Amino acid sequence: MHAELLLSFESLPDGDSGWILPAIRAGLRQRGKYDFVISTAPPWSSHLAAIVVGRLRGLPVILDDRDPWADSPGRMLYMTHPWMRRIDRWLAA
């Protein structure tokens, strides 16, 4: 049961979560005047990176959802532990 939880947590919010920190660093390195931060998903990791960059830069964030986040069949492959499904639904709200 613990392994299942760890594997689910590793894939939060999706299987592409490994690029969240590099994306945040890249977003913070951008110079110039910006009015907002925009991201499109899936992958949902892009939204988390955009939210962090937006908050740190004091910019509004626009999130484009092309597919449902929580409870979509592909997502359930990652979210196998009940706790992680709850967290996933909270993130999607």
Image (cartoon, rainbow, N blue to C red):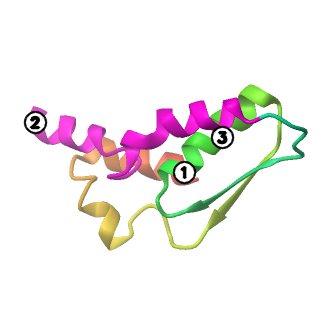
Residue 56 versus residue 32: which sits nearer the camera?
32
Residue 31, by quadrant, is top right
x, y percent for residue 20: 48, 39
At label 3, the amino acid type is: Ile
Question: How dense is the environment of label 3, judged by Cα within 10 Å: few (below 14), some, or many (20 and up)?
Answer: many
Q: Which residue is mark 2?
A: 3
Residue at 60 percent of width and 36 percent of height:
26
Q: Quadrant of the N terminus?
A: top left
- Give the Cα distance between marks 1 and 2: 26 Å
Q: Which residue is mark 1?
A: 46
Q: Earlier in the sequence, mark 1 or mark 2?
A: 2
Q: Is residue 69 left or right of residue 18?
A: right
Q: Are marks 3 and 1 in contact (CB under 8 Å)?
A: no
* Numbered disc 3: secondary structure: helix
Nearest to viewer (mark 3 / mark 2): 3
Q: What is the number of the mark on residue 51?
A: 3
